[in-house]
Structure formats: C-alpha cells, structure tokens
Image (tube, helix red, strand yellow):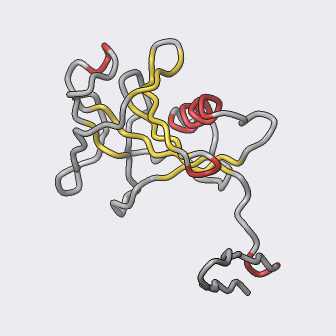
C-alpha cells in the first residue's frame, strides 16, 4: 500500500508493494497527422495537425518498453513509424487503425520518455527532426478520420 505523509522538514516517500508495482520504463507516443495540403514538403509550424484517434474518438497512444532495441526517443519514434505503417504492433499489442492513413513525412510524433520528458519529432524523408511543440492542433469534425492527404 502506498501512503503519502506530509510533515514539515521531512521527506515524503512512496513505498511500492507487489500490488502497486511501478510501471516499467516505457516510451509513449501520440501521432499528429499533418493535414496541410503541402505536408509532403515536411512539417512547418503553421501546418494544422490532427491527433490520431481510436474509432471512439479517444487519443491513440502507443507504448514501447525500453529494451535493447528501444533505448532512445529516436528509436521509439522509429518503432512508432513501423506501427503507423502497419508493420507491427506496439508493446501492448495495439495495432494501427485500418481507417487512418499511415504515418508519413510531415507528421509529428510526440514521444514521452522514461522520466516523463517530452520531445516532438517530425517525420522527415530520412529520419526525424526535433521540432517545437505544435500549437496548431485541430480536432476532426464529427466522425471524420484522417484517411488521406487531402
């Protein structure tokens, strides 16, 4: 059982027990699909992005546990690209929805790593480029899904 105690001039500790084990070190990712007409030219800060979602509208979050193949945010982004191109599932068995287009150049992948640090990477022709946190996020109206470039 975990108990938080607050006392002045003391340290608060968290005690993990078998029924409250800490989560394994993992990278989580959210993919933002570039919906701008010129997205093949790569991501630009003014391009509108729509988060990839499940059919119920909830955000699609992919999970990749740290391992000898996933040791950095770029390796996690590469694995997310593979999932987003229907080549494999994430580490929880989640696959890319069939009604959402594949991850492509110009899209942005938000990676949250162990320690909860966050980096945004745009998909480039030959890898990934670090970008500032996107500010032009758009929702998808109604039941519209990101199914194509246009």
* 1 left or right, relative to 99: right
Viewer-proximal residue, 4 or 9? 9
Direction left: furthest residue: 141
Q: Residue at x 82, y 78 (%)?
A: 18
Direction front: furthest residue: 9
Q: Residue at x 71, y 36 (%)?
A: 70
Q: What quarter of the picture does the N terminus occupy?
A: bottom right
Total labels drawn = 0
Viewer-proximal residue, 120 or 138? 120
* 89 left or right, relative to 42: right
Q: Is residue 139 above or below residue 120?
A: below
* 78 left or right, relative to 45: right
Across and down, in percent, residue 120 comes to: 44, 35
Q: Hey, which quadrant is residue 56 in on the image? A: bottom left
Q: Residue at x 78, y 41 (%)?
A: 67
Q: Hey, which quadrant is residue 12 in on the image? A: bottom right
Q: Is residue 21 above or below residue 48?
A: below
Across and down, in percent, residue 6 comes to: 60, 84
Q: Is residue 76 above or below residue 28?
A: above
Q: Residue at x 32, y 22 (%)?
A: 43
Across and down, in percent, residue 48 comes to: 22, 34
Q: What quarter of the picture does the C terminus occupy?
A: top left
């Amino acid at each position: 059982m975990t108990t938080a105690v607050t006392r002045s001039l003391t340290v608060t500790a968290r005690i993990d027990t078998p029924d409250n084990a800490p989560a394994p070190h993992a990278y989580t990712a959210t993919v933002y699909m570039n919906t701008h007409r010129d997205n093949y030219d790569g991501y630009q800060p003014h391009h509108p992005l729509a988060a990839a979602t499940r059919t119920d509208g909830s955000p699609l979050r992919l999970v990749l546990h740290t391992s000898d193949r996933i040791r950095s945010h770029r390796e996690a982004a590469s694995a997310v690209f593979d999932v987003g191109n229907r080549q494999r599932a994430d580490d929880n068995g989640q696959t890319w929805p069939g009604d959402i287009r594949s991850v492509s150049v110009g899209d942005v992948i938000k990676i949250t790593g162990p320690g909860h640090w966050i980096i945004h990477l745009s998909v480039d022709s030959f890898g990934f480029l670090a970008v500032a946190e996107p500010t032009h996020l758009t929702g998808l109206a109604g039941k519209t899904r990101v199914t194509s470039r246009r």
